[in-house]
Image (cartoon, rainbow, N blue to C red):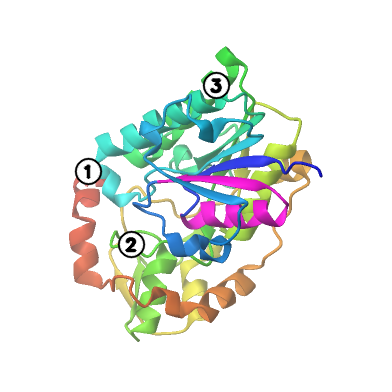
Amino acid sequence: MTKKPIAIVTGGAGFIGSHMVDLLIENNFEVRVIDDLSGGHLENLNQHKNNTNLVLEKADIRDINSAHSVFKDCEFLFHFAGKGDIVPSLDQPSDYMSINVLGTVQMLEGARAGNIKKFVYAGSSSCYGLAKTPTTEDHNINPGYPYALSKYQGEMAAFHWQKVYNLSVNSIRIFNAYGERVRTTGLYGAVFGVFLKQKLEQAPFTVVGDGSQSRDFVYVSDVARAFLAAAKTSKNGEIYNLGAGNPQTINYLVRLIGGDIIYIPERPGEPKCTWADIQKIRTHLNWEPLISFETGVARMLDCIENWEHAPLWDSISIEKATKTWFTFLNKGK
């Protein structure tokens, strides 16, 4: 009997990480999840709760020693764990740097000690700042807030380990991932989490600015496929931009969901458009986005009850939550 390959997924109880777990188990992997459950949820893994091919190591990524048995005999390590909310990073910069940079270093050390074949880092398109579009991987780096800086420095650490310690590393800079299980915590952030709760409560959608801004939304199952391809490839030391390559406006998203709108002030320092140039990932990894935006939104509406316990945001609570953003990023005004 052939032994199953083993993969580690940090943050595997979270949004993207749990979909990565699904895909790996579908592909006959044994999966070890590292997650402290501060942001992820056990219910994201419930479909596998009786599956002996899934093991959960509940721990902070900063606290796992590189000699831990979780790293032994693994083929791939997919690193999604970290703090991912943009707005709160302005209030908690040290937490973001600690978890997203030092936590990454700890995982790199574990991968090095365990002789893991490929470390795939979940990077962020936020490192580009207000970028030219479509954005290529060689675009200049200009992180505009602590979250973006911490993700970029974590990526740089990964490539430093590749250079110095010969660890095989690829990084994928995710643009705007969405799909089932997208975050429903009390922190103001992801537009889908905000809008779907508002839809459930028949409250108006809080649209930033005039809603003409566009985002390169990429469906979460397509994201997971890209990460598996980046692990399996013989290519090493590569950065890949990951979006659908087809930006959608917030106004169009609202039309697909259906409901009333109220407009709230545009936030300084936010891009008018995010748009990944995906030629490289298409060419190198033979990856294509499979889920259209319309199909993806429909799938989320089919499970809208999952947002029943999410916080309901309105213009007043959003103004309070983003006060720091306007304080620090309202430059020149």
Residue in the picture at 46% in, 66% down: 212
Quick one: SS at disc 3?
A: helix
Q: Is residue 192 left or right of residue 222?
A: left
Q: Disc 1 marks which amino acid?
A: Phe
Asked if residue 200 is positioned above or below residue 130 in the image, the reply reads: below
- Quadrant in the rendering for residue 130: top left
Where does the image place residue 320, in percent across and percent down from the top left? Answer: 18, 61
Q: CA distance from mark 3 to mark 1?
A: 41 Å
* Residue, disc 2: 185
The label nearer to you, 3 versus 2, is 3
Q: CA distance from mark 3 to mark 2?
A: 34 Å
> Residues in magenta?
14-35
* Residue, disc 3: 113
Work out whether residue 245 can be spotted. no
The label nearer to you, 3 versus 1, is 3
Work out whether residue 198 can be spotted. yes
Q: Is residue 251 left or right of residue 317?
A: right
Asked whether 57 or 22 is in front, the reply is 57
Circles 3, 1 touching at the beta carbon (< 8 Å)? no
- Confirm whether the magenta stretch covers residue 82: no
Circles 3, 2 touching at the beta carbon (< 8 Å)? no
Asked if residue 22 is positioned above or below residue 210 in the image, the reply reads: above
Residue in the picture at 71% in, 62% down: 290
Q: Quadrant of the N terminus?
A: top right
Where does the image place residue 101, in percent across and percent down from the top left? Answer: 39, 31
* Residue, disc 1: 328
Pointer 3 or 2: first along the chain: 3
Asked whether 319 or 80 is in front, the reply is 80
- Looking at the image, which residue sits at the far top? 164
Pointer 3 or 1: first along the chain: 3
Label 1 environment density (alpha carbons within 10 Å; few <14, some 14–19, many ≥20): few
Asked whether 75 or 173 is in front, the reply is 75
